[in-house]
Amino acid sequence: MATLGLIGIIASLALLIGFAYRGINVMFLAPLCALFAAIIAGAPVLATYTQVFMPALGKFVVSYLPIFMLGALFGKLMDDSGAARRIADSIVGFLGPQRAVLAIVLSCAVLTYGGVTLFVVAFAIFPIAAELFRQADIPKRLIPAAIALGSFTFTMTALPGSPTIQNAIPSPYFGTTTFAAPGLGVIAGVIMFGGGMLWLTRRAHSARDSGEGYEDGPLMSPPPRTGHRVHDRLAAGEAHTDPTHHGLEAGPDRGRSVAVEAPPASATMPAALAYTPVVIVIAVNWVMVNLVLPRLDTSYLAEKAYGGVALKDVQGIWGIIVALVVAIAFVLVVHRRRFADAQQSLNEGTLGSMLPIFNTASEVGYGAVVSSLPAFAIIRDAVLGVSPNPLISTSVSVNVLAGITGSASGGMSIALQALGADLAARAQADGISMELMHRITTLSSGGMDALPHNGAVITLLAVTGLTHRQSYKDIGVVAVVIPVLAIIVVIALGTMFGSF
């Protein structure tokens, strides 16, 4: 029976990844795949759905809805106010077209480290990147890798204080904050950034030596600006390889780049005002978790009405919430005259967070169902037995699940839902810092997640009008290979010297 249950789990994972790659929404797909595994294992279907899947989904939404909602709202406001475009323009203007790759990577890094979602960044940066690469005569096929390097590598998982959901999810499990293991995080970030830049620079030079320059090509020509904005649906998780799903017409130009509108009035915005919200997010978050919250009387948290928790269980989430609220308020007040319709921006930003959080929460529910099945003990023991070092076990489990699901936050959530308590207990028994566990978990979510079926990868290629054949090799190196090498280095350093 255990063998049959294990086959059911493996088959359900195959169905989840296969149908998700074909564009079926995970919120609909995850419960079906979970219940398929339950049926094969002989578990009661309705009870599994209402008593296992839904409580796990609901718990995730309750814990992380503010971060998803505020993050999406902040990104939308930065985009519509023109601040995101102004930041990119200032970096490009400072570095010049001769450093096109570095300019694009840094533009993406500043925006994502400040809390702007990678989907918004892709749409805001791509028009700038296309023009800059054209001026520098660098092949357009390298643009997706440059955006990927700046958007979903070191700023997503490595740099301390990053307000990304991937950096926030481990906090309740390990009682940590987004600033966990800052020294190791910076080292990992340097490896990812340095290694990625070396690779992309080498690729650009190699292309130049072989006589290859910038060329749009029949499937890469940017279409005329039509005024249609499609990035809100993409940001909501509707990534698909078929351009007709993005409002593009099928036909001779099938696969061409998605049209976007330029943010209003960005050219007249002082650069300092554009950067200030990004600085606010990082600074307020640090002040809250290191200076303000520890000085408050939070003894009431031990009461049942407040969950019977300690400050360390919630301060990581609290810090990000306050930081994003302050930054949002700043953007609304200071840039109020730059919005075409501030109310519409608020509404669209808020609603744009709903599908992403429920997609991820559904994957958490899937993980809860799978981990409740008797056959999962075989998988758990295999993962925990990979190495006596909990850091390696954590990294392997998160990387594998993130790779299978094609989602950093989804894979990490499944791993922590199923194995978090066991991994934390083993780490404590071995005297391993919870901060180190937090950083390894976050870093590992950004390793194998960026395989070809990853939603962000598919969306990025759709935005740029390129294909996997043209651009994925470089994306894979900067977003998978180098981050995995960074994880290995951090595990080695953490094992030898502990958290720092």
Image: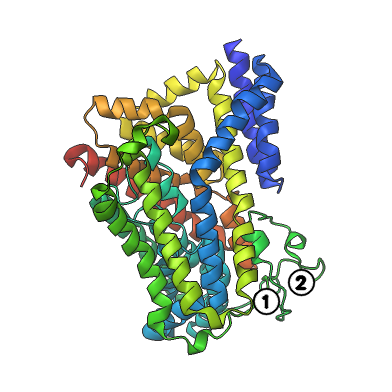
N-terminal label among 2 and 1: 1
Q: Position of residue 164 (x, y in %)?
A: 44, 54
| Residue behind mark 2 | 253
| Residue behind mark 1 | 221
On screen, residue 67 versus residue 260, left or right, reads: left
User: In the current view of this chain or complex, which residue is farthest to the top?
Assistant: 1
Res 361 label: none
Q: Residue at x 43, y 28 (%)?
A: 419
Q: Residues within 10 Å of mark 2 (few under 14, many from 20)?
A: some
Q: CA distance from mark 2 to mark 1?
A: 8 Å
Q: The residue tagged with tag 2: helix, strand or loop?
A: loop
Kind of residue indicated by mark 2: Asp
Q: Position of residue 378 (x, y in %)?
A: 49, 18
Q: Are marks 2 and 1 in contact (CB under 8 Å)?
A: yes
Q: Is residue 402 visible?
A: no
- Colouring mode (rainbow / by chain / secondary structure / one colour): rainbow
Q: Residues within 10 Å of mark 1 (few under 14, many from 20)?
A: some
User: In the current view of this chain or complex, which residue is farthest to the left?
Assistant: 497
Q: Is residue 429 above or below residue 252?
A: above
Kind of residue indicated by mark 1: Ser
Q: How many marks?
A: 2
Q: Which is more toward the observer, 199 or 320?
A: 320
Instruction: Quarter of the image for the N terminus: give it.
Output: top right
Q: Which is more toward the observer, 19 or 109?
A: 109
On screen, residue 292 versus residue 247, left or right, reads: left
On screen, residue 254 versus residue 485, left or right, reads: right
Q: Is residue 66 visible?
A: yes
Q: Residue at x 31, y 64 (%)?
A: 283
Q: Position of residue 332 (x, y in %)?
A: 50, 73
Q: Residue at x 51, y 61 (%)?
A: 117
